[in-house]
Amino acid sequence: MRNIFNHAFITLLIIYTALITLSYFKVISKYSLHFEIFAVILALFGIFALKEKKDLKLSPYLIFIALFLILILRIMPYADNTVPLGYDTGIYKYIAETYRDNLPNIPEYGLDNWIRSGHEHGLFILTDILYIFGFTTNNILIHFLIFLELLLGLAIYAAAKKFFNKNTAIISVIIYAVSVIQFKTFWYMYYKNITALILLLAALYCLKDKKYIPLIITASFMAAVHRPTFLIFALSYGIYFLINLKQWKSLLTSGIAFTLLAFPFYMNRLQAIIGSMIEPLIEANIGSGTFITFFQYQFLILAYLPFALFGFFYLIKKKNYNILSIWFIINFIIVYFKIIFYNRFIIHLDIAMIIMASAGIALLIEDKKLINSAAVIFLVASSFFIVINEAANAEPLVNERELNIIESLSKTEKEAYVMSTTSYYSPWLLGYSQRKTIAPGLFDYDQWGEAVWRGFYNLTDKTEIINLFSNYTKPIYLFVGEHQFDYIESKPCFELYREENKTRIYKYVC
């Protein structure tokens, strides 16, 4: 019977590898077939076809090759560019410099309300330390983030080795290196997600190793860096506690300890945090988080999806209900059923997928069949083809010329406001103009709301414009970038302050 499953598995693996390779090279459309169903079938056949063997050892030099690949892919976008990548770039710059300017104190009540409700202390305590050691803001936004990407690779290696074996750990770093999802996370500059994922993997490692003091320290700082990641960990920890009641004393003590240690980071912010959580519930607009959708995700991970399922099914077969598998299930439920910030949690799900896939691939290549290894090489090469193209085409949202124009706003009156007429430029204006920023639906100075903003774009009556701007204190400068339509040009009350190519700054003069 095993031979039948084995032959069927090999046949399916060859077909799947050929189809995925063709789709990645755009010979056929990846949306033309239900690859996800194919992946599930392939994984199920693998469970019955393959036997666990441990007499194959991968070369440890593969780790260095993978780390080198991570480094090269993260450096590529900066080959002829000095502007940081990402959408939240200006937000991180603004908050980090606010903390820096308050050294040696950690600011609290002087912070903008949107910072207090949505941005924890942890990351910016870390950036304060970097500033003390001579780092510049650009060093933090570019170079230190690349370092964290390498550190995340090592954290994945350590966790995979602890929960599985060295082969799985080596493969996990390779898959992480060619993961287009993780490169997109880097491009978006999800700084807190990346930092918190390193801490989460470290916490899982400590829990598996029953090192409770490091677990408490790591988990509490994770809470201080990124609440959503800590929420995922806390849910996983709670379920793990219920499954492992024999260890209830140490698990309960550790859980209480890291919760208490995390509390001081939120003690003075509870009102702002609760308010930010209740408002979306009242408006029935919890949000998905800015990232790719689950539909896009499943077609971007086709190269390792069947192996991730295979690795997960293998754990179920072995009745190995460890916290890694619990974390995987919780992430999947949140993303698949669109519970809260589900698109952003794809980043976490992908890390779990990578480790599970590595376990599946390790079982596959340990079977020592040439066709198995060839299929893995082809699929990894296909992923590499996608991520290398992604890195080669990666550009910042704002080019150097536009950024220089935004920075020139710092020469306006110190009491001036800068108004962003689209969310595309809002974080950049916040971080680089050195002026209070009015932006649609963001920060603390927007007094209009979505409906008023929509009306403003089509407004041409001078009296109505004056009434609308009576809520704000002059002087006010409006920024119109090259990636947006110029709604201001035909309106009264606005004088052109600066123009360069398609980028313009207007001053409100009525």
Image (cartoon, rainbow, N blue to C red):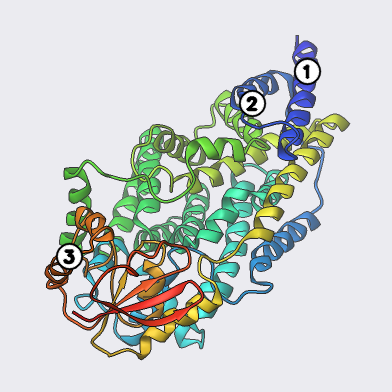
Residue placed most toward the observer, 207 or 306? 306
Could you tell me how far apart the alpha carbons at marks 2 and 3 are, in whole angstroms? 47 Å
Inspect the image, locate mark 2, and give the three-letter code of the amino acid beneath it: Ser
Question: From what the image shows, is residue 77 above or below residue 177?
Answer: below
Q: Mark 1 points at which residue?
A: 6
Examine the image and state in which quarter residue 73 appears. bottom right
Q: Tag 2's secondary structure? A: loop
Q: Where is residue 67 in the image (x, y as percent from the top left)?
A: 70, 61
Kindly identify the residue that appears in the image at 76 percent across and 36 percent down: 21
Q: Tag 3's secondary structure? A: loop
Q: Name the residue under label 3.
A: 447
Inspect the image, locate mark 3, and give the three-letter code of the amino acid beneath it: Gln
**Residue 137 can be seen in this image:** no
Q: Where is residue 304 in the image (x, y as percent from the top left)?
A: 66, 37
Kindly identify the residue that appears in the image at 45 percent across and 59 percent down: 196
Q: Mark 2 points at which residue?
A: 32
Q: Tag 1's secondary structure? A: helix
